[in-house]
């Protein structure tokens, strides 16, 4: 097979990644390029390939291909990158198809290749990767690999050159960037804290359309999206994490304001008579216990049982207004008397 990047040989040899390996225009030394070696999905393999290329780790790059290699031999493959300084890459929505014990992935790709002389060229096309079913393999195990690919010169700007899809079928659905950002943030922050059974679950997503309090009658509505991730489940409490879209920062984790409480019991015994509950300050928490979002009232409610029968607890109500959630009511039942008799310790329901 001829080198799959033959169309670019007159400029300089190319390589691809699932994301832009370098975001700026300054040259980056090979030993400073990020090391990525991940075969968990098709895009990850492409990212790994071009991590290796940008780090000049050509044996590793060669290893991401299957039996059909990108050049007639390894030395030719290495020599092809003599004039390459860096490669910026974007991938589109990936499609897949099963056949005879394998899954084939089609990956749209756009590349901006920069030579050591500073010249740039844009190429676009599709790559096919193959994942052979682990159940039918004999040792040594072969993870997902690059099967074939082809790129052609593109006259479009790099940001516009990415093919919408591979093949003649309709373009795949547009990638939900905000959802992907929320999922990535959740896994990065709570992947080692949440129950494994919840980590693969999709979040519940809500759309909240609103107008700012200072909006004029003719102003268009804004939209915020709320992402609810389940995290853990204990005997009587379930913990959740919420993210929401932000016009400035993209996606942010929602923080819940909670009061600091001074609770007094007779003889300092929580099983004795409750003398009083006083708010002495406030703090925020990223955790929401036994929570629920009500789309009609635009409120998130939390309910934290202090023990299983629920006779001692705290509960918060958070109202969406002016683009964010704010605490409007907090109730506390600190009596441990076998009955549910909470008292309201924070009440901002009359706030505008």
Image (spheres, helix red, strand yellow):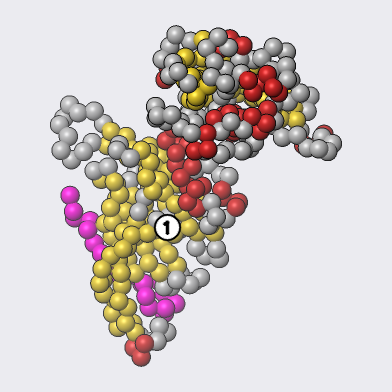
Image coords of residue 309 (percent x, y): 49, 71
Please name the residue shown 64% across and 36% down the image: 39
Q: Residues within 10 Å of mark 1 (few under 14, many from 20)?
A: some
Image coords of residue 80 (percent x, y): 61, 18
Residue 36 is drawn in which quadrant?
Answer: top right
- Compared to 99, does 153 lie above or below? above
Please name the residue shown 48% across and 10% down the image: 154
The secondary structure type at the circle numbered 1 is: loop
Image coords of residue 202 (percent x, y): 53, 41
Residue underneath mark 1: 287
Left or right: 257 in relation to 66? left
Residue 1 is drawn in which quadrant?
Answer: top right
Residue 2 is drawn in which quadrant?
Answer: top right
Left or right: 186 in relation to 55? left
Residue 336 is inside the magenta segment: yes
Left or right: 12 in relation to 314? right
Please name the residue shown 47% across and 51% down the image: 189
Please name the residue shown 41% across and 73% down the image: 312
Q: Is residue 171 visible?
A: no
Tell me where the magenta segment starts and ends, as one range.
333-352
């Amino acid at each position: 097979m001829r080198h799959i990047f033959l169309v670019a040989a007159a400029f300089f040899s190319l390589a691809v990644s699932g994301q832009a390996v370098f975001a700026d225009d300054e040259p980056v030394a090979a030993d400073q390029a990020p090391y990525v070696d991940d075969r968990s999905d098709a895009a990850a393999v492409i990212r790994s390939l071009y991590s290796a290329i940008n780090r000049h780790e050509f044996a590793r790059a060669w290893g991401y291909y299957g039996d059909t290699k990108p050049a007639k031999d390894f030395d030719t493959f290495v020599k092809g990158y003599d004039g390459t300084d860096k490669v910026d890459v974007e991938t589109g929505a990936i499609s897949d198809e099963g056949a005879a014990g394998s899954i084939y992935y089609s990956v749209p790709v756009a590349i901006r290749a920069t030579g050591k002389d500073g010249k740039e060229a844009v190429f676009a096309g599709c790559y096919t990767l193959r994942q052979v079913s682990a159940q039918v393999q004999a040792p040594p195990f072969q993870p997902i690999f690059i099967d074939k690919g082809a790129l052609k010169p593109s006259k479009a700007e790099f940001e516009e050159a990415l093919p919408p899809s591979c093949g003649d079928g309709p373009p795949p659905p547009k990638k939900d960037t905000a959802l992907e950002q929320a999922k990535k943030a959740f896994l990065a922050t709570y992947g080692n804290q949440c129950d494994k059974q919840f980590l693969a679950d999709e979040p519940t997503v809500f759309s909240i359309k609103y107008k700012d309090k200072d909006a004029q009658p003719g102003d268009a509505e804004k939209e915020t999206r709320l992402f609810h991730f389940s995290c853990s489940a204990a005997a009587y409490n379930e913990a959740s994490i919420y993210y929401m879209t932000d016009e400035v920062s993209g996606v942010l984790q929602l923080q819940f304001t909670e009061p600091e409480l001074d609770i007094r019991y007779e003889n300092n015994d929580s099983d004795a008579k409750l003398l009083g509950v006083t708010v002495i300050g406030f703090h925020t928490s990223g955790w929401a216990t036994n929570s629920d979002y009500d789309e009609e009232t635009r409120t998130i409610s939390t309910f934290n049982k202090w023990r299983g029968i629920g006779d001692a607890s705290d509960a918060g109500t958070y109202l969406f207004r002016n683009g964010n959630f704010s605490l409007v009511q907090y109730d506390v039942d600190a009596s441990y008397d076998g009955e549910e008799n909470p008292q309201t310790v924070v009440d901002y329901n009359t706030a505008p």
